[in-house]
Amino acid sequence: MFGDLRRFDSGPLRGADRFRELLDELFPDPGVANIRSVPTGSYPMINIGRTDDAVRVYVFAAGLSAGDLEVSIQDNVLTLQGRRPDDDKGAQENGRRPYFRRERSRGEFARSIALPEGLDADRAEAHSQNGVFVIHLPKREELKPRRIEIQSA
Amino acid sequence: MNDITRRDTPREPAETRAQERDSGRALQPPVDIHEEGNALHLVADMPGVTSDSLSIEVDNNVLTIEGEIRLDMPEGMSAIYAEVQAQRFARRFTLSHEIDAEAIEARLDNGLLHLLLPKKQSHHRRRIEVRAA
């Protein structure tokens, strides 16, 4: 479903798609890095979706179990805090492991997101499955779409 | 009637092409590869991939890791913001000949894939005797 967002940007430059795909391959998606000049993967990636009665935040944090991510809401700002284990030492005692590739990010992170207005923080729920944390934030009653019946005179 | 079909036909391939492009779009999972003991260890971040949606194949010394991102999404949801804009992860590696493809082990744990790639037992130099004719 989140792939749908990508379709919006296919405007008049349809022919350039091939070229852009090629460039995307050469210079992969910076991911979160476009917010600030931080290296890719400094923060776990986030998707946000909306239904009629709730907003859902998906946090893609592989390797983190339920206790490793701290989720808090204050003043309509959602803060995600956690720590990705740094397992460089390994079983060997003699220094660091020899790495051939080291692309995964490590260490602590904290990310805050401003939420849309009108969410009920008290009824928020969060669960994790397969390294994806889902934070379910129900809308307050008065913000849900309501159907107004038309009465015939 | 003819008019309608004529107008519909050129649109169809464009749509399927767009679908193909979408399904073809895959994220490259970040990986760590290190050597420990007599094996290579590969760790890949693949959040949202379940053991059912993950496929690992070795063909002709090329290791392919592919996994579909399965999210629990309620019906009628629309996206507000998305950093993960693909449905799957995919990545390929060329294995060296010293890896024993038969003995590769995989473990998936909270979206973290661990692959153990043991080296072949018989990977030492062999001497070939030259017989006198």
Image (spheres, coloured by chain):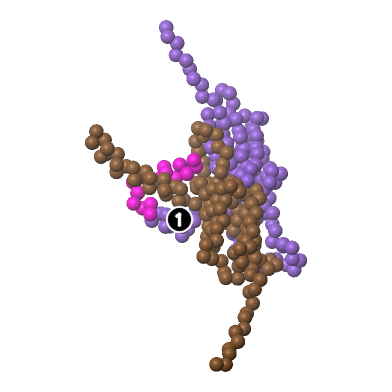
* Shade representing chain B: brown
The segment highlighted magenta reads A1-18
Residue B30 percent coordinates (x, y): 57, 56
Is residue A125 a member of the stretch shown in magenta? Answer: no
Instruction: Say which quarter of the image contains residue A81.
Output: top right
The chain assigned the colour purple in the figure is: A
A123 shown above or below A47: above
State the residue lying farthest toward the front. B133
Residue B99 seen from this side: yes
Specify the quadrant that holds the N terminus of chain B.
top left
Q: In the image, is residue A146 above or below residue B61?
A: above
Q: How many C-alpha atoms fall within 10 Å of the one at disc 1: few (<14), some, or many (≥20)? A: few
Task: Using the rendered view, name the quadrant where residue B44 is placed.
Answer: bottom right
> Mark 1 — on which chain does it sit?
A
Residue designated by label 1: A24
In the figure, is residue B20 to the left or right of A40? Answer: left
> Which quadrant would the C terminus of chain B be assigned to in this image?
bottom right
